Each structure stands twice: as C-alpha cells, then as structure tokens.
Image (spheres, grey):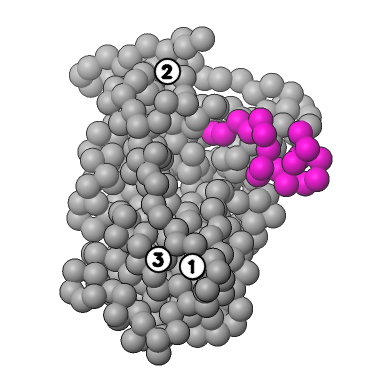
Amino acid sequence: MWTGRQVPTGPQVSRKGWRYRLKALTLFGADDMRIVERGKPAPGPADVLIKVKSCGICHTDDSLFQGLFNFIKYPIVIGHEIGGVVEDCGSEVTHVKKDDIVTVNTIGSCGNCRYCHIGEYHRCAQSRNVGINLEGGFQEYLVLPASYVYKMPDGTGCEQAAMVEPAANAYGIVDQAQPKIGDYVVVIGPGAIGVMTVNASKLRQPGMLIAVGTRQDRLALAEELGATHLINIRECDPYEEIMSITGGKGADIVYWCGGDRDAWDLSRDVLGTYGKLLIEAVPSSRESEWPVRVEDFIGKMNTYIGARGYTPKQYEETIELIRSGLLDVERVITHRYALEQHEEAFIVSRERRGGAVKVMINM
C-alpha cells in the first residue's frame, strides 16, 4: 500500500530537531509522475537498504511514463539504472556491507522454475524486475532483496554503478553474438545502448566496426568508443555505403539498437552469408510485424536473435570491464539533473536535446 504524500510546493526550511521526509518520484499513471514524501524504509533479513545516488533514464522508463506499456500497477517508483551506497543490511546479508558502493541487477529470479534450476536466471518464468514489479531508483532510499545488489570494485563511483545495467545490455548482446576476430560488424542506432555496443564490440577485435545513425554528435561518440566507419543515413545511401565498405560482402553481425522500419530493412539487407542479426531495441509499436525474407534463411543462411537483458555472469563481467576502463561508460553520460528537475530531464532524454545520450538523475 502506498503511504507517501505529495511534496508541498514552495521552499522547505530545515529546523533544528526536524528531519526531511524522503522524496520518491512516483508514477501514478500515464503522464502523471510526481515527487511524494515517504518515511525511510527498513530492510528485512535478506534485504539491502540502498541510499540511491544516481539513476539513469532509460527508454523503457520514458515509455512507462507515457503509458505505452500496460503491465505495471500504479503507483510505482520507476527507474532501474541504479547506483548507490549501502545504508543498512538485513541479518542474512553477507556479500555487501554498510558504505559499499553498489549497482543493481534489474532482472530478478524466483530460484525455483526450470530455468533457475539450470542456472539461466535471466530466463526466469516468474521474474520480478526493478522499476516494473519492484520499486525502482528514482527515490532517495530503496530496499531490494540482496540477490539484486552487486558490490562495485574499489575506485569506481555511483554514476559508474548506475551505468552497469545499460552497459550489461550492450555487453550481453555482443557476448550472445559470439563474434570472431576480423568480423565485419554494423551497429544501427547509436543511442546509449548502441554506442556502448560499439565499445563492447571493439573488445572482440572486429575487422570493421560501422556505426549507422542520423545524428552526427552520436556518431562522433561512437567513433571515440571504437567505430572504424561512420554512416549518417541523411547524407548517403546507407546500404550502398555499407556494401562498398565491406567490398560487397555485407556484415557478419548487425546489432539493431534502434530505429524505424527503414532501419530494420537496412539491418536485414546488409547481412552477408551466414550473418547474424541481434535485435536489442523494441519497436515503437509492440504489434509491429516487420518482414523477414525466407530466402535470407535458405540462400544467405542468416540468423535472427532476439536479445533480452543479460545473464548474472554477463552482469559481473560488465562490472569488471568498467573497473578496468575497457568499457568507458562515463563518456556516455551527457546530462545530469536533480530529482526535482525530473520533468526537464525526461523531456531532454526523450527529445535528445543538446546532444543527449544518457541522462542521469543524481539525488
């Protein structure tokens, strides 16, 4: 049951002996998100209380805000790209302690279904996800089951912790593709996940790493993170350009990280023989039926792979890649806002104002 109340308007003055109630950015329905006050939560025996420091805005968060998905129950605090500091732990928690900097694996698991029994926890049939089934990170304090919480290595910060979740999506699709050294790789849609996919792909030593998009600033960021070729589809025929760059062979791997029907057709068309298409992004309409030609399966022997999240192992490997600096997630953060500036933050993220890639809300 929701026990918070809406924050009163006007400045709040601190008084001796009086403590602020805690703020939580709460979604009450489509286009209805407000800061409310609530008491400080307490962890159960197997829980962790996190003092949230940073939480990134994901495309999924904005879709929930706009009411495009109907699988959540209101009211709820959304936000799943979380970095913070352990405030308190339950008596059964041993892998993290007070003052540890932590990140949150969004994808929960029940531990009892057939997938959990074989160790494929990310495929759990009864998964409870942070910011969807469980409360998320756009609030000052958050209690989660300890299994969701991962300690960050020494020397890393809370913004890096918040970036683990989106980076794990990027690393996860690259790991799922199992690229070979020298492969011709195309990344379509250089948003936050797309540019981090470029970064993760670079680590696999591709022969070519081609970033395709419409915004020159994002393409420039992709180049900084490892792209060998940039294609702005507003300036050329992207199909002809990719086929020219690859000597007519096409791509061994295409990562579809965003775009419309035209971007889908391009992804399909530039696949070479035995090519793999990894589908990370969700189309604007979940009822979209975008064609796949039978001859691509028979003649070109292409493989289409839907990518959804990451495994616990991939999440842990992402943390290590961030610690080592091989995944440069801080460069992807372009805008930072306070919780009270959430309206502007969501607009900037949605409309990509000012070259926005990843917009971070810091508490």
Residue located beneath label 2 in the image: 75
Residue located beneath label 1 in the image: 295
Dot 2 falls on a residue whose secondary structure is loop
**Front-most of residues 308 and 139:** 308
Question: Which residue is painted at 55% across and 27% down in the image?
Answer: 134
Q: On the picture, is 55 further left or further right than 214?
A: right
Amino acid type of disc 1? Glu
Question: Which residue is painted at 77% across and 46% down in the image?
Answer: 119
Name the spot of residue 38 as percent of width and height, x first.
44, 16
Asked if 151 appears above or below 114 in the picture, the reply is below
Q: Residue furthest right?
A: 117
Q: Name which of mark 2 and mark 1 comes first in the sequence.
A: 2
Tag nearer the camera, 2 or 1? 1
Q: Name which of mark 3 and mark 1 comes first in the sequence.
A: 3
Amino acid type of disc 2? Pro
Label 3, label 2: how many angstroms apart (C-alpha)? 38 Å
Residue 116 in view of the camera = yes
190 magenta-colored? no
- Label placed on residue 267: 3
Q: Main secondary structure of the magenta part?
A: loop
Does the CB distance between marks 2 and 1 fall below 8 Å?
Answer: no
Q: Quadrant of residue 177?
A: bottom right
Tag nearer the camera, 3 or 1? 1
Work out which quarter of the rendered image holds the C terminus and state it: top left
Dot 1 falls on a residue whose secondary structure is helix
